[in-house]
Image (spheres, rainbow, N blue to C red):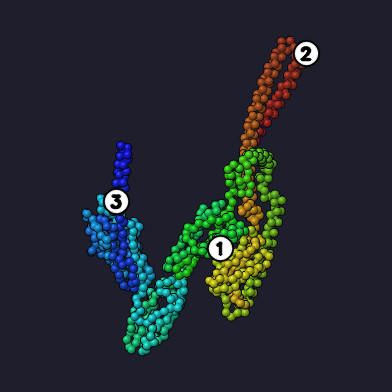
Amino acid sequence: MEKKFLSLIFIIGLFFVSALSVKAESLKEATLFLSPSTGTFPIGSTFTVSVYVDSGDQYINAVKTKILFPADKLQIISPSAGQSILQVWLKQPSYSNIAGWLELEGGVPAPGINASAGVLLTITFRVKDTGSAIIKFSDDSKVLLADGLGTDVLGTTKGGVYNLVLPPPNGPIVTSNTHPNSSQWYNNNNVSFEWGFENDADYRNIEGYSYVLDDNPLTTPDDISEGKETQVSYSNLADGIWYFHIKAKRSGFWGGVTHYGVKIDTTPPAQFPIKISPSERTSQKDVVIHFLTTDALSKIDHYEMKLVPISSEARAFLRNESAPILFMEVQSPYLLSLERGSYDIYVRAYDRAGNFSEAKKRLVIVAPLFQIVEGEGLRISEIVTIPWVGLWLIIVCLGALIGFFVYKARKWSKQKEKLLADGIANDPVIKQRLEELKKKQQEYAKTLAILLLVGLTFLAGQKVSLAQSSGTMVAPPLITEFPDNITNKELFYIGGKTNIPNAGVIIYLQNTETGEILAFNAMSDNFGNWFYSHPRFLTSGRYIVWTQTQINNELSPPSAQLKLNVEPVALKFGISQLSYEAIYLIISLILFIGLLVLIGYLIYYTAQGRKKHQILMQEIKEAEQALTYGFLLLKHDIEKQLEAIDRLKLSGEASSELDERRQKLLADLNWIQQNIGKEIKDIEIREEKH
């Protein structure tokens, strides 16, 4: 019984698997395609492209798509839906010749349609410009199955690629040695044309040629002959697309016209920034380089990047790793995996005419300042690892040290109260130091001016001697790669381009403080690119840099001078470096913060002291008033006793003891009156003061 039950389950499972496979086979993919998908068409002509759907041997009832085309090369004259299989238009076909799209959305009534090549729409295009035109379907296109569920069965789309050319020559055959390809962009705005015929017999009876250069692809020259010359040149043409039109006159009749296109773009792409993620100064070794720009005419062709190491650690890494030392083609975003060190990143954006614009950004990869090492403690800049117990001990010691400084600051603030009130600038030692500093600054400024004057005179003499020694000047090198500033622990580099391949380049480096001039040599490659990296660190100071091109014994004029600051590095912690300026800034900030803290303590203790002083004066006043009141009570008691003695004397009971007692009481009364007057006067004086 159990075996029969298992067999039944197995048969049911096979049935469902078979049903699912049949359903999967039945759901074949639909296809949208264009016909014809290729072709060559001249400027000014029109051609028709039909949009088809292959339903995949199943019934469909709706199609939605957007057709994209290059608006700079093609324009739609009119779409036609006369023979379309779509009978219900959910959205009438619409198009834009500015943005370059055509959109359609329609359906078929039940039960739908099954077609291997059903026409959806017919489009007529007019050719505007030469080049390659790609027409394709948008990614959100849909072909819906007639299953009541609206299942999208679109699998693939097939666009078209069309070659757009100038009309075939009906007149002389035109060539250009400066712009040989009419479909290619050039950065040369000086154009020369030559023309002729294939057979020598065609030159017979030529009476002249009429030609014109303009921006219209189908202009017909006038009937005025320009002569029998077979070549012409144009200089300094503006950027854009130009067309040369020419016809020949033979035996009194003008022949057909030949059109020749020229594309000129001498403007480099727009300037652009380089963005580095996570930041330009980071402890992460994997960074992402972002860059993007545009070009108005020929459009962006590609990007190239160059990585220049400027620290010894970076140079050692790039020497051992397969990293891009020269310019290499890249795309944004570009991932770089580097070791710690300093790098200058150059990115060039090239357009299709060969122009380029360049951007530069410095990347510094440093060791992480703090790093928690599991089971060990806190690692500082990968130099030392402090165990947790040691770290806690250091924190306790720092707390005790800070407490000691708070105590000393309290005493110091009270001692320096007079100095702060008078103003520290009036201190005689400070005045003397300021005068000495101003004197030294003036002496330094005079020395620097003399050195610069001597350097400029020397360079001017070099330029004059070069101009006198050569009638024709070799162009100086173009400098494109140059650091704005480096430290005396970073490597100096310079690079650029010459208009002469395989030429020598002399790099001059002059220290403006000492007047010393260094010269280095480099060679340009087959494309005129040259680069030099100094093998050693430069001493700190200010430099001026210029270059010359050398061909055999002939030197070019000096290039423009560039300024280079080599800042001294005072302290170095691993890869992290601190210049003297940075140290001065840090010390200044620390002193300023300390000064603010001391001023805070000064204000606090002054306020506390004044408050306590007022409380003390009030208590003294109250005590003096209490004493005065006590003296008054004592005076009153003495006066009562004197009155009692006087009464006894009147009654005849006077004695020598009473006389002595009376004399003593009178003396005490006189003393009390004097002290009460003095205390009252002191209280009045204190009240006037406070």
Q: Quadrant of residue 543?
A: bottom right
As displayed, is residue 150 above or below residue 620?
Answer: below
Residue 250 at what x, y percent from top left? 34, 87
The three-letter code of the residue at mark 3 reads Lys
Q: Which mark is residue 656?
A: 2
- Comparing marks 2 and 3, which lies closer to the viewer? 3
Whether residue 427 sits left or right of residue 5 in the image: it is right
> In which image quadrant can residue 218 be found?
bottom left
Q: Are marks 2 and 3 in contact (CB under 8 Å)?
A: no
The numbered disc on residue 23 is 3
The answer to whether 612 appears left or right of 109 in the picture is right
Q: Residues within 10 Å of mark 1 (few under 14, many from 20)?
A: some
- Crowding near pointer 3: few (<14 within 10 Å), some, many (20+)? few
Question: Distance from label 2 to label 3 (Cα)?
Answer: 149 Å
Of residue 683 and residue 503, the one placed in the foreground of this image is 503
Q: Residues within 10 Å of mark 2 (few under 14, many from 20)?
A: few
For the residue labelled by badge 3, is the local secondary structure a helix, a strand or a loop?
helix
Residue under the image location 58 percent in, 43 percent down = 374
Of label 1 and label 2, which has the lower sequence position? 1
**Residue type beneath disc 1:** Ile
User: Is residue 487 something that shows in the picture?
Assistant: no
Residue linked to disc 1: 325
Q: CA distance from mark 1 to mark 3?
A: 58 Å
Q: Position of residue 166 (x, y in %)?
A: 36, 74
